[in-house]
Structures are given as structure tokens and as C-alpha cells.
Image (cartoon, rainbow, N blue to C red):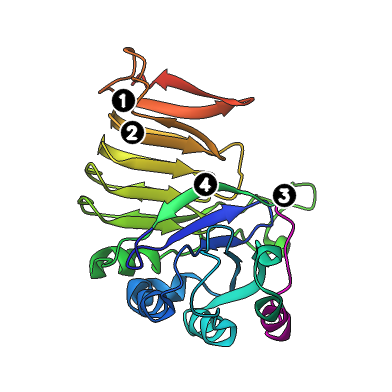
Amino acid sequence: MSASSLDLKSTRLDALLLPLASRDWEAALHSMRTQWAAVAGAFDGELLVLDLRGLPPQGAPVPWLRIKQALAELGLNAVGVLGLGQLAEAEQQGAQAAGLPARDEAGAARTSAALPGAVSTAVSTAVSAATPMPQEPPPSAAPETAAPLPRGPRCVVIDRPLRSGQQVYARDADLVVLGLVSHGAEVIADGSVHVYGALRGRAIAGAKGDLDARVYAQSLEAELLAVAGVFRTSEKPLPPEVAGKPAQVRLEGERLVFEPLKY
């Protein structure tokens, strides 16, 4: 992994996972501050675990406090470390002193979302533009016998095509794209993903494990599809009944199901 491209992943700990595989800490800190600055408001206190299982054993010591502070400035709350036991004793003590305890590796990553080095202003603005659906009327306005109305999910709407290298993450929300998702672009949602155009890039629905999440596309041509951690890449061709056609992708047990959409 290059120092200019960092990955965030979701885990069973319900926290983001940040793998670090280089001891070039200045480059890593620079990437954190420049790569995610435009979307920092979308994190809003999100928990994060540092994954150092791929870190080289030799090199500059981990600057725990600097990393934790840089993440905090972006709204990310570092709460622990994976792979702490493989580090030198002094580094382990430094992590504990910084309030970053070892985490059980059972919380392995399930979904990956690579954040490009330059996120477009238009996309990052849309990420922070998620707004709740209108709330139901106060109880006094409804009949006493009526069941309470469920609150709808939040929704992020992108009203332009997404080019290669762009990414949108709808945290705790559905994601709607009113246009093309190009090869190399990535759309991620904790809820469902709706693409009213050709879906040629990567689509990840149910990023935090929502088994009912789905991917909908006007033209399904994706290079990667995932629902709640179950993946399928373009190495395995799409079924002919959905390839290049309106379709939905949902989870059934441990497999993805592809169904044409009929209007």
C-alpha cells in the first residue's frame, strides 16, 4: 500500500479499520490530513481501529499521540489497535499510554473502501448533505389506536455522474446516484445503493452489516458488488439476464442474488 493511498474498512466491532503498512509516518499523517479533509464532517466521532498487522518490524517508531490527534481533528475516534502484540515492547507500551489497547483479531475487516488522494468538492459536499426524512406527526395528532409510523432512512443524493477515482460513502443512510458510476468510481452505503444510470464501478451496500441492504442499477455492469460483506468481482461474469440491464442485487443467506427489474 502506497503512503498516498489509505484504506478504511468496516469491522465486526462496528468501527472503521485503518490498515497501516508503512513506517513513513510523515507521509501517512500528510495523507490523513489532505485525503479526508474534504469529508471530515461525515465521520462525526466514528470509532476507528488501527490495523498494524502488515507493518514492517523495523523502522521509525509509531507516533501514537500524533496519529490519534490527526484522526481526532478529522472527527475519527481511535479506540484500539490490531496486531499490537507483534510490535516491540516499547511500542506496545506507547500504545497503551495513548489509550489504544490491543483489539481481538476476531474483528477482522469485511468491507474495504479505498479513499482516493483527491476527493472532488462536489462529491464531498454531497456526502455531508445527508438529511433525515421528515419525522412523523406528534403522537397527539394521531388516533390513539394507530401504530406509530416508522422513520424512514436517511438518504444521500448525488445528482451528477461519478468519474474514475471518485468515491461517495453514505454513512447510516441509503445512497442515490442520478447518473453514471464510471469504472474506477466507488459508491458505498450503510443502507442500499441506487444508481439511476450505468453502474460500471464498485458498489458496496450494507457496509456495516445490514443484511437487508440492496444494490439497484439501471444498467448493471459493475466491476465489484458487495452486500453486507459478501463480494462478487468482475472476474466472475454477471448472469446474462441482468448484465447491462436494470437489476437488483440482494443477499440470500451467504450468497448474492441477481434479479432483473421489470417495469
Whether 180 is among the magenta residues is no
Structural distance between the alpha carbons of marks 1 and 3: 38 Å
Tag 2: residue type? Answer: Ala
Q: Residues within 10 Å of mark 4 (few under 14, many from 20)?
A: many
Whether 97 is among the magenta residues is yes
- The residue to which callout 3 is attached is 106
**Viewer-side label of 2, 4:** 4
Q: Circle 1 — which element?
A: loop
Name which of mark 2 and mark 4 comes first in the sequence: 4
Q: Circle 3 — which element?
A: loop
- The residue to which callout 4 is attached is 111
- The residue to which callout 2 is attached is 217
Foreground residue among 246 and 188? 188
Name which of mark 1 and mark 2 comes first in the sequence: 2
Q: Position of residue 2 (x, y in %)?
A: 34, 62
Q: Residue at x 64, y 25 (%)?
A: 253
- The residue to which callout 1 is attached is 246
* Magenta part of the chain: 93-106
Q: Circle 2 — which element?
A: strand
Name which of mark 1 and mark 3 comes first in the sequence: 3
Q: Position of residue 6 (x, y in %)?
A: 40, 63
Q: Residues within 10 Å of mark 2 (few under 14, many from 20)?
A: many
